[in-house]
Amino acid sequence: MSFVLSEEQLSIQKTARDFARERLNVAAFRRLRDARDAQGFERGVWSELGELGLGAVHLPEAWGGAGLGYAELGLVLQELGRNLAATPLFGSTVLAAAVLREASASQPGLAALGERLAAGEQLVALAHEERPRFAPYAVNTRLERTPSGLKLSGEKALVVEGHVADQLLVVARSSGAMGDRDGLSLVLVDATSAGVTRTRLETVDSRGYARIAFSDVALSEDALLGKLGEGAALLDPALDRATIALCAEMLGGALEVFERTVQYLKERQQFGVAIGSFQALQHRAAQLFCELELSKSIVMEALSAVDEGRADVPLLASVAKARLSDTFLLAASEGIQMHGGVGVTDEYDIGLFYKRARVCELLFGDAAYHRARFATLSGF
Amino acid sequence: MSDASELEQFREETRAWLQENCPKSMRSKILDPTEEVWGGRNAKFKLPDSKLWLERMAAKGWTAPTWPKQYGGGGLSAAEARVLEEELKRIEARSALKSFGLWMLGPVLLEYGNEEQRQRFLPGIIRGETRWCQGYSEPGAGSDLASLATRAELQGDHYLINGQKIWTSHADKADWMFCLVRTNPDGKKHDGISFILIDMQSPGVSVRPIQLISGASPFCETFFEDVRVPKANLVGELNHGWSVAKRLLQHERALISKLRDDAPEEDETLPEMAIRLVNGGEPGPLQDHALRERLAQVEMDFLCNKLTLRRSSESIAAGIGPGPETSMFKLYGTELNKRRKELKVLFMGYQGLGWEGAGYTARELQMTRDWLRSRANSIEGGSSEIQLNIIAKRVLGLPS
Ligand SMILES: Cc1cc2nc3c(=O)[nH]c(=O)nc-3n(C[C@H](O)[C@H](O)[C@H](O)COP(=O)(O)OP(=O)(O)OC[C@H]3O[C@@H](n4cnc5c(N)ncnc54)[C@H](O)[C@@H]3O)c2cc1C
């Protein structure tokens, strides 16, 4: 594994950087937000992203992806994070795709969906969370076998891109009790099926999420991914990968907000000098710099670990998520403070990063959750 | 042959050599600091094997793996040196020689010294024959090092030195000192400073130990009274010693930030220690949840810091950097080290409160002293606040 980017990686980074700055910048995000856009992203730009080969860098060539790795995906997500770019890349192409890929190892029939997903033609969402705080096995949505097939009932609290997804990968309980790892099953549900009710959630980060209720949704046997009751085997690795990918996006956001803040410290004059000459602010900025450097390292390491299929991916996912949860929020909140009054205005971008940081912090477990998980994985 | 396979071959040869030459007794972590080897005229070898190990390593130049062979160094490339380091670590080999000469003065002489000085001083450092100390700080010049006042006046073929240094680590055991002196009292304070090498046996040099809160006293005040130092001992240009001084500080900071890598008491990991002491050996979640959370945080930060050190060294090897990031590692590494030491004492509970005598094991007493010693980490070599200043100004470009 190398921490130094290769020529190819540098070129992907540049393409992503240029595209994001031009087409997916914060101003574009604001337009969607202010228009209360029903989809929350622009279909046209989404296609362009795919055409540039940035949409599915990490997906297999068999699906029409670029066949590269998470290291490359991370570079793209970082640039999107820097611009608060609203796309379904994370929800569909990363999160849902990770589950599909796990499942397709034993179910080749899923490849067709994989292709449509990689091409961005169809959006798939993972419907997983039920509780207000991340708890991967706290699933109460029931999956039952009936003489006529499978039946799904329950409610999901927050489904990333659930409002626009064509297909939903639903985590349900087919046996066991709330909190058990055993007894979880994964089913693929057409989002327009009878009995599916979706409510778009208006969240502080103005991105796309839905609450989704399933009321006696009838499914055929082949809706099942993997084996009945063994869904966690597909879910766990996929969640780790998605968590690491999200950390790359968070890193981009944190770096951007930090750089903007440092720039502001150099420009803003008070008491006849640039505020960046005040040591109280210098030290906080320097401290933040260190936290960000450490964040870069762990994100790169975790992304590479995914590509190398290493056994410490779960551990690194927790280290990365704990750190990025804290660091992104710290960078954004310090950013607001150091901007003074202008920092809390809606017109200024800093606050948008802060809101995104809060959402990212809670997605897939906050720092406290991952410190506890790290401790468990480390045996203490 | 490709670079990779050459490197693999080097690894095999190194492994074989170490297998043959590293005495068995040298393949364990040092628990007792008095077993460390610092070299010098009055070198002490508590274990006879340490002497043998030093001699063998020095003969190969592997005490200074990347220094040129002509001065007795190993002549290894950065990649080879890393392989050597990995192989040493693999067998838990003790460091053959600890030395300010290796870590700080040597690299500076290679960059700023003249040929005569390199030939004269480097071999002795590599073989552990000369022990060096650092004469930077003065009572009135700590963080504000450039305000130092120790005077050196040129008198024919030698400088006459008068003044006082403080905090000189191991001055009482050192053979030589690399020292900052004022050679031009007029003008701005960063100008008029020179970097000079002083034989500690010169008439007029005297040292007085200072005791720390840890009870140890490896530190001294050093006094100079009409000390005569030959002109040839000046390193770099007269009055332009500040750049030499700063470069040496970068090496020092890089070192301090790495130090805990082979700190004496790291014979068990922090989690192992926590299980042993907090859980009474019972595996599984720590019964004290607050400590568990703190430990997780420290362990994660430790990992991230280690990865960042590696990232930086890879960037340097690829020709990117090094920048002022040594300040970051000094800052983060030392603050982290303090957090680790504090946790250990908390894990020990009442057994971490011992100072000496009955009721405490030698190891417990050592850990407690180490915790107290660690408080100096974020002061020595430039305090954390000074590192933050450097990062703010040099890395982030914030105005003065
Ligand atoms: C264990 C130990 C070993 C040492 N070994 C050596 C040695 O071998 N050789 C040698 O030459 N020196 C040595 N030193 C000296 C060391 O380099 C100095 O102690 C250090 O540079 C700090 O100087 P000071 O102690 O005078 O503190 P001061 O400079 O008086 O600082 C006091 C406090 O003020 C803060 N401060 C000062 N200036 C600023 C500023 N501009 N902005 C913000 N905060 C500031 C400091 O961070 C500190 O918190 C050693 C020190 C210790 C403790």
Image (cartoon, helix red, strand yellow):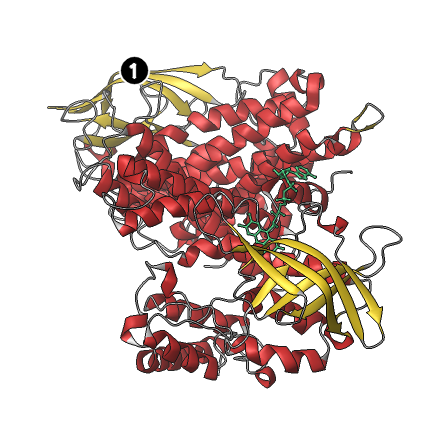
Q: Nearer the viewer, residue A57 or B375?
A: B375
Q: Is residue A303 left or right of residue B313?
A: left
- Whole-percent x and y of residue B43? 46, 73
Residue A318 x, y percent position in the rendering: 37, 39
Instruction: Assign the C terminus of chain B to one quadrant of the image.
Output: top right
Task: Classify A237 as above or below B121.
Answer: above
Residue B214 placement, left or right of A369 = right
Q: Nearer the viewer, residue A53 or B136?
A: B136
Image point 13% across, 26% down: which residue?
Answer: A176
Chain designation of label 1: A
On screen, residue A361 above or below B362: above
Q: Is residue A55 visible?
A: no
Front residue of B279/A142: it is B279
Who is closer to the viewer here, A364 or B61? B61
Name the residue tied to disc 1: A195
Q: Is mark 1 within 8 Å of ligand 1?
A: no
The percent coordinates of residue B307 (x first, y second) are 47, 52
Ligand 1 occupies quarter: top right
Residue drawn where x is 78% and y is 38% of the image = B399
Residue pictured at 31% horizontal, 34% vertical: B292
Disc 1 residue type? Gly
Considering every residue shown, the one lying at the far left of the view is A147
Q: Taking B340 as reference, is A337 above or below it?
A: above
Residue A146 seen in the current view: yes
Assess disc 1: are there few (<14), some (14-19) or many (≥20) residues with their C-alpha within 10 Å of its C-alpha. some
Residue B101 placement, left or right of A90: right
Could you say whether the residue bearing mark 1 is in a helix, strand or loop?
loop
Would you identify the image quadrant in which residue B390 lies?
A: top right
Percent coordinates x, y for residue A204 in the rendering:
52, 17
